[in-house]
């Protein structure tokens, strides 16, 4: 009999979004005909952009001809895409060498899989609330997790505590779920803390494309010294509607070299390369080809148009919350709106209440950590009509 990874016993029974889907299914079965509006999981509703679709078609045709057909791709991803991403970074004010970019199939997979590079006895520092994948994947490995509180008092942007010693630090900015975004000065404090403590920052910038304030950083590499301490994860899921198409990228700078217990120097870039080439055979060629089209000028303009559309939804949601006097954050440099549950309700209680009485699905804050117990998240990734209808129902309810 195999002995099992018993750390799994320490996880919640199901993943947050799976539990939401389960509850919605139960409700749907017992209330046929009710029109449910889903503003829970941050899944896009706009189709892929014209440029991406054209490139996909072209790539499919390439796969049909012996002259242009591609089999296994290079382990880090195709050069044409890594160069395009490096150019995108440059336009946004960060200098990222294409050789440090690894193409993958999702920021979720990479933020989870990166734990392979680190020993089990590292102390992990995680903001609370935050995207549940960081906590769950470290629980799976049995690592010690230290939490830092994100509350209304610190604008949901926890800063380092010099008395806390961490080895791995997760930051997510713009934050999922709160929508709060660190400024450069704040990120610099994190970078200094990480360098002083020889810690690694695992920086999730999956929502960087939603930053509209030019003063706010879209990448941690806009901050001096970040290459000495930070790995960055980014994705085309929300930027370009690739949630079902799957393409992401992770930057592992070559400066990230640490001394192993036997005195040997180990490079995280080389380790990730080794892991990636051993356990992953790459994002499909046709998807990488479409992703490269996204990073062209025209492709980016199309993405910005879609993002502007979603941000109108964010405004609709924010307007109703403001009118009701419900405190909230996000919705400006982020597609998420995070607010206090009305009537002092707890978040799962509010989830059921909203589903039952308005047939609107959101995400209970408790799923992102204990500081989310009285909070709720709505996403702006719906269509205008359904978002407007959801907020009319919300307006009538309170
Ligand atoms: C979310 O709703 O938090 C995200 O869509 C989940 C994800 O990106 O995996």
Image (cartoon, rainbow, N blue to C red):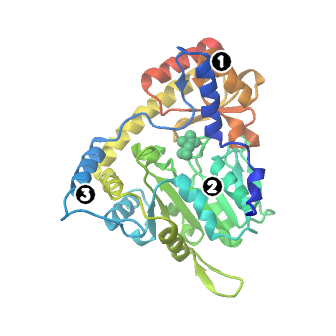
Quarter containing the N terminus = bottom right
- Residue plotted at (19% across, 59% down): 65
Instruction: Give the SS element for disc 3.
Output: helix
**Ligand 1 is in which quadrant of the figure?**
top right
Instruction: Give the SS element for disc 1.
Output: helix
Q: Position of residue 67 (x, y in %)?
A: 18, 65
306 lies above or below 209: above
Ligand 1 within 8 Å, label 3 CB: no
Q: To which residue does mark 1 refer? A: 356
Give the spatial CA distance, label 2 vs label 3. 39 Å
- Residue plotted at (62% across, 55% down): 171
Q: To which residue does mark 2 refer? A: 171
134 lies above or below 258: above
- Residue plotted at (79% across, 62% down): 164
In the picture as drawn, the residue positioned furthest to the front comes out as: 1
Q: Earlier in the sequence, mark 2 or mark 3?
A: 3
């Amino acid at each position: 009999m195999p002995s099992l990874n018993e750390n799994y016993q320490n996880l919640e029974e199901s993943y947050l979004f799976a539990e939401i889907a389960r509850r919605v299914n139960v409700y749907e079965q017992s209330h046929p005909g009710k029109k449910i509006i889903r503003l829970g999981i941050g899944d896009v509703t706009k189709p892929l952009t014209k440029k991406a679709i054209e490139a996909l078609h072209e790539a499919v045709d390439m796969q049909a001809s012996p002259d242009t057909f591609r089999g296994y791709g290079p382990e880090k991803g195709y050069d044409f895409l890594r160069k395009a991403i490096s150019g995108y970074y440059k336009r946004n004010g960060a200098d990222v060498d294409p050789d440090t970019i690894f193409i993958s199939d999702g920021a979720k997979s990479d933020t989870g899989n990166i734990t392979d590079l680190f020993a089990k006895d590292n102390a992990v520092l995680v903001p609370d609330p935050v995207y549940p994948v960081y906590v769950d994947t470290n629980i799976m490995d049995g690592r010690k997790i230290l939490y830092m509180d994100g509350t209304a008092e610190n604008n949901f942007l926890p800063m380092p505590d010099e008395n806390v010693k961490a080895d791995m630090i997760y930051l997510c900015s713009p934050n999922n779920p709160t929508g709060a975004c660190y400024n450069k000065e704040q990120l610099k404090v994190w970078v200094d803390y990480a360098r002083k403590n020889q810690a690694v920052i695992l920086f999730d910038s999956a929502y960087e494309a939603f930053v509209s304030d030019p003063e706010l950083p879209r990448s941690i590499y806009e901050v001096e010294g970040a290459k000495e301490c930070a790995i960055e994860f980014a994705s085309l899921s929300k930027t370009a509607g690739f949630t079902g198409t799957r393409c992401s990228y992770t930057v592992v700078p070559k400066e990230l070299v640490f001394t192993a217990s036997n005195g040997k120097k180990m490079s995280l870039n080389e380790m990730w390369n080794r892991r990636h080439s051993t356990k992953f055979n790459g994002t499909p060629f046709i998807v990488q080809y479409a992703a490269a089209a996204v990073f062209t000028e025209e492709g980016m303009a199309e993405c910005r148009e879609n993002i502007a559309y979603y941000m109108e939804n964010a405004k609709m949601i924010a307007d109703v919350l403001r009118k009701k006097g419900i405190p909230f954050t996000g919705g400006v440099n982020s597609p998420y709106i995070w607010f206090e549950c009305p009537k002092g309700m707890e978040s799962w209680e509010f989830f059921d209440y909203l589903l039952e009485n308005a047939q609107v699905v959101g995400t209970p804050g408790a799923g992102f950590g204990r500081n989310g117990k009285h909070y709720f998240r709505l996403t702006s990734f719906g269509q205008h009509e359904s978002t407007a209808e959801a907020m009319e129902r919300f307006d009538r309810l309170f």
